[in-house]
């Protein structure tokens, strides 16, 4: 702390000799965050009233930017939580600095009080603050970081529910504490888990912190004395309309009261179960603050009645139970419980409604469908972490989806028929190869894989040049924005599918048109819909084709940019899942069947009047402005300062219909916010841009 203190004051001394070229309105964090309760109830969470504005705020830093050389928060850029020095309600915000080389920002520590200048923005529906500058000259105090605000879970979510409480918006960004809660699920993300109280109100504890993300979450059933963290919220996420999330920063934000027994190393024998075979289930069970009083296994056949079996304690921590033999084609599922001498009980899997261990009783060789099948909504295979051997035809090789790369094999058609395979030998597979592979089933980022195909012993090339399975025709409504493991979408994971009569409904599923830059997110994903008019995602970055949505500046004049209302007879690809969404990955140009630009009157096209956001923005000293004209006519495009004074005329000429671009050189102007306005044939539009020198 002392070292960072001296660094910051050294920066402060040096920077105090510099003149500030531009000043911005000073507002409070509350001014940015406040939404009237009546508005929240009637229309829901809306963007900040200052969204897109550049302002200056004052606050106390609540966490170090870096911890042991690593960014403390996983926020896409170095970041800190900032709280108002006095307000609590509407008194917190996440502050990010996309400039990773800022020594002053990177040296910030808890308790630093300073002024920060940046742009108000939104991530999902969490308001955040993206700095445009910080040299340390605005630091003016150091004090202990603020204590957490004590809340109950129903202050955040609806009583007895995991659904977010809209009126909890006032706690967004605020450091809070909830007490006497129990861990529910610990399989919702790396280091993340859920907690619930005696009223069954449930809140997720997130993993924005690098420390939390890399930690092992508490065992389900663990009683926590408290959880502390900063509130973020999401909409249409995890199957919920609204979700409030507590984001702890380090291990001191979580304190365990009592540990339940820990159940690990669950193994079944045999792995491949035939009719007439008993199955032995073994587990390691121990209790760190007491003793294991009992352990039980519950099993059922074909989702029928649960049968209870007491587990036998073979050694100090080894417990075992036997599931009796079953006939062919049965699906047997099971879960384990353990109770300690204090009455604390743990269950694994923790959510038995949507996840159970299971196996298939089969009197035949294993297929891809058997490995992929996941009937409870968890996405996990019956053979997870076990070695399997399956056969299929390669539907995607390294030339199709180079990013990864993704090599996919498929056995026939229909649900559950495709799977991703990995290993050095798979890099040589060619589309149309019929192969038999042996490897370990692994669920990686919610996608089922067969890993370890690294030698000739792990595969057999049965025959090359086979016809590919016919793409499975499904509707965009079948996928929509379904959550991970949802069976109606999960069954198509890694399967070759097609949508028919598709229109592009949004050229960027994650933000506005244009590149992935500060203030705009673009990860190469678009939204499309078929005749159902239900949207779903398509990933353009991963495949080996010409189609893009202008996700980076270098693509500005590169064909083919996908635009709203472009249409295709068919869109083909591999179904994938990543970052909370199912999405189609087209492989090559051939997967875009009869792609064309639609110019019907009821669709927006590039030939309608439109003034686009300048790029880059902010800029120094020049930027490009794109605009389109529906009809020929006189066009004026002028630039004004924030006082409304004209500073430049970029266009004053007769122009034809179509798209146009003009360069704006602001080298003679000072830093600040400027407005640019277009007028043509009665059409008028104005946008803001920022010059930073």
Image: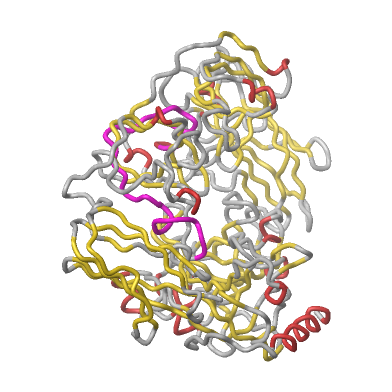
- Confirm whether the magenta stretch covers residue 539: no
Vertical relation: 133 (above or below) 662? below
- Which of the 4 image quarters holds residue 117? bottom right
In the foreground, 160 or 172: 172
The N terminus, quarter of image: bottom right
Q: Position of residue 557 (x, y in %)?
A: 42, 48
- Confirm whether the magenta stretch covers residue 513: yes
Q: Residue at x 33, y 46 (%)?
A: 535
Q: Residue at x 49, y 37 (%)?
A: 576
The C terminus, quarter of image: bottom right
Can residue 273 be seen by looking at this rendering? yes
- Which of the 4 image quarters holds residue 656? bottom left
- Residues in magenta, as a range: 489-518
Residue 141 falls left or right of residue 367: right
Q: How many marks?
A: 0
Vertical relation: 596 (above or below) 260? above
Q: Residue at x 26, y 34 (%)?
A: 501
């Amino acid at each position: 702390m002392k070292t960072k203190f001296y660094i910051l004051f050294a920066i402060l001394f040096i920077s105090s000799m510099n003149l500030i070229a531009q000043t911005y309105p000073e507002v409070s964090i509350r001014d940015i965050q406040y939404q009237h309760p009546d508005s929240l109830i009637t229309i829901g969470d809306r963007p900040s009233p200052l969204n897109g504005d550049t302002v200056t705020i004052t606050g106390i830093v609540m966490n170090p930017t870096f911890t042991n050389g690593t960014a403390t928060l996983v926020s896409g850029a170095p970041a800190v939580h900032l709280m108002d020095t006095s307000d609590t309600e509407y008194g917190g915000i996440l502050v990010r600095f996309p400039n990773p080389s800022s020594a002053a920002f990177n040296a910030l520590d808890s308790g630093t009080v300073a002024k920060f200048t940046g742009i108000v923005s939104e991530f999902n529906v969490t308001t955040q603050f993206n700095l445009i500058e910080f040299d340390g000259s605005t630091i003016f105090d150091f004090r202990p970081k603020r204590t957490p605000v004590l809340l109950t879970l129903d202050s955040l979510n609806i009583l007895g529910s995991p659904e977010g409480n809209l009126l909890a918006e006032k706690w967004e960004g605020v450091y809070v504490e909830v007490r006497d809660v129990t861990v529910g699920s610990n399989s919702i993300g790396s280091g993340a888990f859920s907690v619930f109280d005696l009223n069954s109100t449930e809140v997720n504890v997130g993993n924005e912190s690098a420390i939390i993300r890399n930690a092992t979450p508490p065992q389900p059933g663990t009683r926590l004395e408290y959880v502390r963290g900063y509130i973020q919220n999401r909409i249409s996420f995890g199957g919920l309309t609204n979700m409030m999330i507590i984001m702890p920063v380090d291990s001191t934000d979580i304190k365990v009261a009592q540990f339940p027994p820990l159940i690990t190393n669950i193994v079944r024998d045999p792995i491949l179960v035939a009719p007439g075979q008993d199955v032995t289930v073994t587990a390691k069970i121990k209790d760190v603050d007491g003793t294991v009083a009992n352990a039980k296994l519950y099993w059922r056949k074909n989702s029928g009645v649960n049968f209870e079996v007491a587990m036998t304690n073979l050694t100090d921590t080894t417990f075992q139970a036997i599931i009796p033999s079953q006939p062919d084609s049965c699906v047997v599922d099971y879960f384990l419980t353990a109770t300690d001498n204090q009455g604390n009980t743990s269950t694994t899997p923790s959510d038995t409604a949507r996840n159970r261990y299971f196996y298939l009783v089969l009197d035949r060789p294993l297929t891809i469908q058997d490995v992929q099948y996941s009937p409870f909504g968890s996405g996990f295979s019956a053979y997870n972490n076990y070695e399997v051997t399956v056969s299929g035809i390669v539907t995607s090789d390294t030339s199709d989806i180079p990013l990864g790369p993704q090599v996919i094999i498929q056995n026939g058609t229909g649900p559950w028929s495709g799977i991703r395979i990995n290993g050095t030998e798979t890099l040589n597979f060619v589309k149309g190869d019929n192969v038999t592979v042996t490897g370990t089933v692994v669920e990686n980022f919610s996608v089922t894989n067969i890993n370890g195909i690294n030698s000739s012993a792990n595969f057999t090339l049965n025959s090359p040049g086979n016809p590919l399975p016919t793409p499975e025709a499904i509707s965009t409504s079948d996928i929509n924005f379904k959550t991970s493991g949802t069976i109606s979408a999960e069954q198509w994971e890694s399967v070759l599918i097609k949508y028919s009569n598709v229109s592009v409904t949004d050229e960027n599923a994650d933000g506005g048109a244009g590149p992935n830059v500060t203030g705009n997110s673009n990860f190469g994903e678009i939204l499309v819909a078929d005749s159902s008019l239900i949207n779903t995602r398509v990933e353009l970055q991963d495949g080996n084709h010409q189609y893009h949505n202008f996700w980076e500046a270098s693509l500005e004049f590169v064909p083919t940019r996908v635009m709203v209302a472009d249409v295709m007879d068919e869109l083909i690809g591999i179904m994938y899942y990543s970052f909370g969404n199912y999405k189609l990955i087209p492989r090559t140009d051939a997967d875009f069947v009869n792609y064309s630009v639609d110019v019907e009157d009821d669709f927006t096209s590039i030939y309608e009047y439109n003034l686009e956001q300048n790029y880059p923005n902010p800029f120094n000293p020049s930027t490009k402005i794109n605009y389109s004209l529906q009809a020929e006519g006189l066009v004026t495009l002028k630039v004004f300062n924030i006082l409304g004074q004209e500073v430049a005329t970029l266009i004053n000429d007769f122009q034809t219909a179509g798209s146009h671009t003009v360069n704006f050189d602001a080298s003679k102007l000072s830093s600040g916010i400027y407005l640019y306005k277009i007028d043509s044939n009665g059409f008028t539009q104005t946008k803001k841009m920022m010059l930073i020198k």
